[in-house]
Image (cartoon, rainbow, N blue to C red):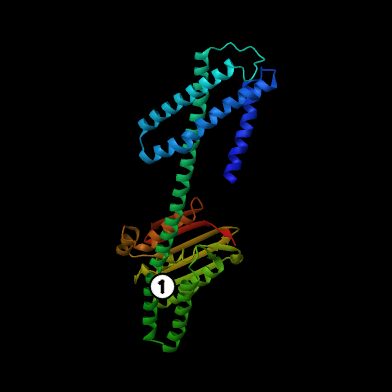
Amino acid sequence: MRKFLMHSGFWLVFYFMWNQIMYFYVSDQGNRLYFSALDVSLIIIAFYGIYAYLMPQYFKHKSIVRLLGLSAVWLLLLAGVYAYLLKLFLNHMLVPIHFDFSWNYTDLQYNRIFIALLGILGGAFLKLALDRMNTQRRLDAMEKANSIAELTYLKAQLNPHFLFNSLNSLYTQLDFDLPQAKGTLITIADLLRYQLYECNVNFTPLSKELMHLENYFNLQRIRTDATTSLTTTAADSESFLIAPLLLMPFVENAFKYISDDDDRENIIQINIHLENEKLHFYCMNTTSAVISSQYTGSSQGIGLQNVRQRLELLYPNRHELQISENDNNFIIHLNLTLSQC
């Protein structure tokens, strides 16, 4: 019903515009309405003939020759019928002509062809435009569905990797301090609870994500003798959202690829700073020469690749990621524009 009203309203407005533009020189109102009605009715029939039938047939068969041929037949048929009817009306003076009208029958035919062609072109262009819009809408819906599916897959990949590292930490602790291992087990349970029940969304409060990150950091520092530091400055973290587990692969890789050299200090340093809606993340860890080449090469594993893909999907044009290495120090800078809760 809504579409019918839209079409009816359009043609009503079109009729009065045609009446004012095409027959402005005719002083008799009856003649203007009469000829405008003939012209617009021809345009409407030509329009819907191609809009409702010929163009759908073209989309079905994908034959431009068939479309052009049927359109030409439809054009000539309408023009011929309307020219003949108009000739009969004029010959029998069904409507008296009160203005100078000197056209012959050939002029009428050409005139009807031109008017019918307007309707055909209008119907074809409108149908093409609507089809393009519908196609783009379906592509956008498919792209969104694919993005959601890809994000779900990427987040699912993080779970086994995280669980593997956490259990390694617990295994190391069980040999030295059983009471502390029980506390560590509770921490692991809290971390997994966060992943299982609070990460099934595209975005989570930044405060929860930072707490999860700090718990993981404190858990993993047990397994290493390196000098570790985690600094967070995010007083307004409850007001902003972030993709869950987005920063975790950086921290995981820092512990995974930390150097184990005896002749220098082994360091993991992480700074997280929130300034307005900008999140600044800095992660640095020392690496040995052999591990460093693996870390920056094609064997980075799924972690960094997942983060890059998630950033492109969730933060297009809203992030800056720089990964560099100098003097066997692996450094990550990430600037992220967050959205508010």
x, y percent for residue 113? 49, 22
**Location of residue 40 (image quadrant):** top right
Instruction: State which quadrant residue 298 falls in.
Output: bottom left
**Toward the viewer: 177 or 150?**
150
Q: Is residue 122 visible?
A: no
Percent coordinates x, y for residue 51 in the rendering: 48, 36
Q: Nearer the viewer, residue 312 or 149?
A: 149
* 299 displayed left or right of 313: left
Is disc 1 surrounded by few (<14), some (14 to 19) or many (20+) residues within 10 Å? some
| Element carrying mark 1 | loop
Out of 303 and 4, give the one closest to the viewer: 4
The residue positioned 36% from the left and 37% from the top of the image is 62
Residue at the (54%, 17%) spot, across then down: 87
User: Could you tell me residue 24's position as x and y percent?
Assistant: 66, 20
Outermost residue to the left: 290
Say whether residue 23 is left or right of residue 78: right
- Residue 71 is left or right of residue 239, and the answer is left
Inspect the image, locate mark 1, and give the three-letter code of the amino acid beneath it: Ala
Q: Which residue is mark 1?
A: 226
Front residue (pair 47, 330) = 47
